[in-house]
Image: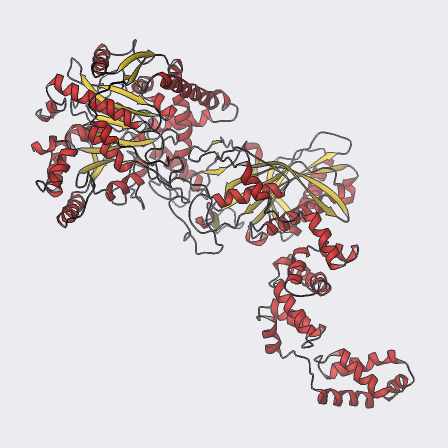
Amino acid sequence: MDPLLTKPAHELAALMADGALTSEDLTRACLARIEELNPTLNVFLSVDAEAALEAARGIDARRAAGEQLGPLAGIPVGVKDNFCTTDHPTTCGSRMLDGWIPPYDATVVARLRDAGLVIVGKTNMDEFAMGSSTETSFFGPTRNPWDPDRIPGGSGGGSAAAVASFMVPLAVGSDTGGSIRQPGSVTGTVGVKPTYGGVSRYGLVAMASSLDQPGPCARTALDAALLQQVIGGYDGHDSASINRPVADLAAAATAQDLAGLRVGVVTELGGEGYEPDVLARFTEAVDLLRAAGAEVVEVSCPAFRYALPAYYLIQPAELSSNLARFDGMRYGLRAGDDGVRSAEEVMNLTRDEGFGKEAKRRIIIGTYALSAGYYDAYYGSAQKVRSLIQADFDRAFESCDVLVSPTTPTVAFRIGERTADPMAMYMADLCTIPSNMAGNASASFPAGLSSDGLPVGLQVMAPPMEDARLYRVGGVVERALDERWGGPLLARLADKEIAR
Amino acid sequence: MTETIPYDDLLTRYEPVLGLEVHVELNTNSKMFCGCPTTFGGDPNTQVCPVCLGLPGSLPVINGKAVESAIRIGLALNCRIAQWCRMARKNYFYPDMTKNFQTSQYDEPIAFDGWVDVEVDGETYRVEIERAHMEEDAGKALHMGGATGRIHGADYSLIDYNRAGVPLIEIVTRPVRGAGAKAPEVARAYVAHLRDLLRALGVSDVRMEQGSLRCDANVSLMPIGSDVLGTRTETKNVNSLRSVERAIRYEMTRQAAILDGGARVKQETRHFHESDGTTSPGRSKEEAEDYRYFAEPDLMPIAPSREWVEELRATLPEPPAEHRRRLQTDWGFSDIDFGSIVSSGALGLVEATVAAGATPAAARKWWVTELARRANEAGVELDELPITPAQVAAVQGLVDAGKVNDKLARQVIEGVLAGEGEPAAVVAARGLAVVSDEGALTVAVDEVIAANPDVAAKIRDGKVAAAGALIGQVMKAMKGQADAGKVREMILAKLT
């Protein structure tokens, strides 16, 4: 592998700014890595090498002409396949949208282009972002570069694996219940779910509107911070978008210590059901925080116990409505249109053929939860739980600046291990869901490896609009861990042959 | 053939209960949730974008002007305005819905608990308003082939999404009871009242024939003496004031026949047929869909400040009743003359004609007689006639200037209605100007006097009234293009 590829984005950007590297050469190296590993890992669903190289040459030319470019200009980036792109199909991992090319760019995509990042392709995901393993993709599962027999997390397994396997230094994902953070955790990468409203959802194909939030995937806290600064900030096309300037996240990611920071360990997110290695790495990480000057206390958030069941009512309810538009009438798959069948029959056949099993399961659950006579018991109650979770966070943030927990109860599980057991699959998001329910900022940073050599993640949660705190904690933990483990965890993967 | 009961007969046994749902398309420049134009009649699917096409990933952003219009409508209907409300999703599958849900309002309407008073034959009826809420319009489906023009039996359907996302306000009444025989007229008067009110507010084009004002009429019958509401039917998209009245009247007679036969009225949606004034069944409400309403998560709650609501209240036009009283005083009409304007639905038109320079008497004369007659003949509403108040005022201007007489003016109006252009252009093209050349007129008068020596003798003897016969002949000789007053003057001058 080209050693260039192991460098973080901010270093590569510095090399390009110094004239020591061109975006074209870097992009070529990334494309070669993708070509080498994609058949094994199934990370990218579409790659347009020519377009990527042309974009890279364009950036190089602008730089050569003396133009002032953004801090990530020329860096190749992978985009989860649920962001609309005018130059790549946007399938959402579903047969329903196989081959569909949107007529518009998502705001996130437009901002990547404006900032001079080079979009190399679209990454695999669970169908319509429903899953924690990327196994529900119509286009087959993505594999974890740490162990190709294991899942890379989900739904954004493609974006996390792309970054972990050095195909690209950066990627963007979307997080509805943990779809950026849990893949980050099990691939040893950084995944951030910004404050709800911090990054525009316009052009992100919706799963559950009140929970969806785009965010960065990277190998370091600083890279993630730089990427969030590119894609974040107010957008008038998203009514939930927060109209405030983005904080200096990059500065936070380079903070030297945690002096004066009050850290709360959430008692409900640990204990039974968590793998011992996960708890051990978590405890070590908390010790690192304390060593860096943080004051650590335990906090209780009792309503978090109901977060998962409440989430599995709200999320299916919203998605059952959001996915109603896929009916074969205007775009995407159309099944059974023989000129005789009625529009209604064609809609039914299209939805039957176009959606996979998990999508159908959730559409049915959501439809039921919103039905007359059941609404109060299910959707209504779930909304009350949501308020209680918010209240728990509010109370905890009165005495703590950030909260911490493991990102996910286990390390990466084996492909196929949980596909027959939806409840076991849903448990992967146990710790990440509360922040989606409350809309606050949350991130996963690498916390070490299990005894089997599989990554474990540390989840950090901050109050809404305090995303900078995530990066401050993440940056400090990252440097301490690098010291302890003798370099970045991912360096181990760089020298390893990835094969099945 | 559907059985019906004579109208007067049913009223001895049943009391009608109405519920009216009126959809108003707002005349905002852009759609409810995106920047696309709302103009009527564009080429199909040219006024669309990712948002109103409901493309994956697109998101709505609410049109502030539409919220403002909704609040003003609510205030004009004497409603309370919500301090905090949300949009909601109404979920159902239909090809004219780009998202397969309609963004509407459910249990949190922007305006609620209002009323309006309407007048029928000098009597006032209070119609209570349950709610006025905001929602988006759907696209328009055109079903090709098949006999009915409806989706069932069609060979294929075309869909125009230009209308998808146009802002609508739905105004829903509480059950209207106690109108008895007048129920259909009260309904008509209510819709006419809304139309005038919305026009005065300037929030909608209120063109029923273009669908910018649409009425669904719920009708049920209650046996007299009972207090239990009967089963209702909902007659959809009744597209003129006249149809509102006819559709309700028909439904009353149809339902009465069913009840008299001991059967039960089926709760269903019905379609009104303009051609024969009947209704026929549409979707059965017994298998009605569960709309699975929930608060729209893509839009923020709407919380109009008290200050803003009061600012908007200050922009309201004069309340209709006060407005009418003031106009009657200003114009100096008797109750009967003024009532004839109101009952023919011409108040706004007369007002606009006066504003364009005509005297109230002249404006009233044209709208309530000549134009009302022509509208009736054409089977359209007065305001659907292709003539504007300014054109009517211009016609009267020609009369006042002595360019045409009343009879010629009617021909000018005919020309304008026929699309021949502005009144002055019609006069020129049709050669309608009165002859003011005294020479030609003197010759005609002399000839008529000479040809009618006995009539002339009567006038000479002081029977001035006999002049009418001579005036008529002169006018005939002049092909109507003379000023009758002038002719009379000349005849009398010669014979007395």
Nearer to me, A421 or B174: B174
Q: Nearer the viewer, residue A172 or B102?
A: A172
Q: Is residue A210 visible?
A: yes
Q: Residue furthest right?
A: B461
Q: Position of residue B173 (x, y in %)?
A: 64, 38
Q: Main secondary structure of the magenta part?
A: loop
Q: Is residue A420 left or right of residue B280?
A: left
Above-or-below relation of B245 to A133: below
For the rendered model, the colour scheme is: secondary structure
Name the quadrant containing residue B442. Answer: bottom right
Quadrant of res B414: bottom right
As drawn, is B33 to the left or to the right of A150?
Answer: right
Q: Position of residue B165 (x, y in %)?
A: 46, 45
Total tally of numbered discs in the picture: 0
Q: With B171 as the anchor, is A20 left or right in this view?
A: left
Q: Is residue A329 magenta?
A: yes
- Above or below: residue B151 compared with residue B414: above
> In the image, is residue B109 above or below residue B137?
above
Q: In the rendered structure, which segment of residues is drawn in magenta? A: A326-331
Q: Is residue B55 a member of the stretch shown in magenta?
A: no
Q: Measuring 36% from the left and 12% from the top, which residue is drawn there?
A: A300
Tell me where residue B266 appears, x and y as whole percent: 63, 35
Q: Is residue A140 left or right of residue B69?
A: left
A241, B448: nearer the viewer: A241
Rendering quarter of residue B132: top right
Q: Is residue A153 visible?
A: no
The C terminus of chain B lies in quadrant: bottom right
State the image coordinates of residue B306 (x, y, percent, origin top left): 55, 36
Quadrant containing the N terminus of chain B is top right
**Residue at the extreme front:** A260
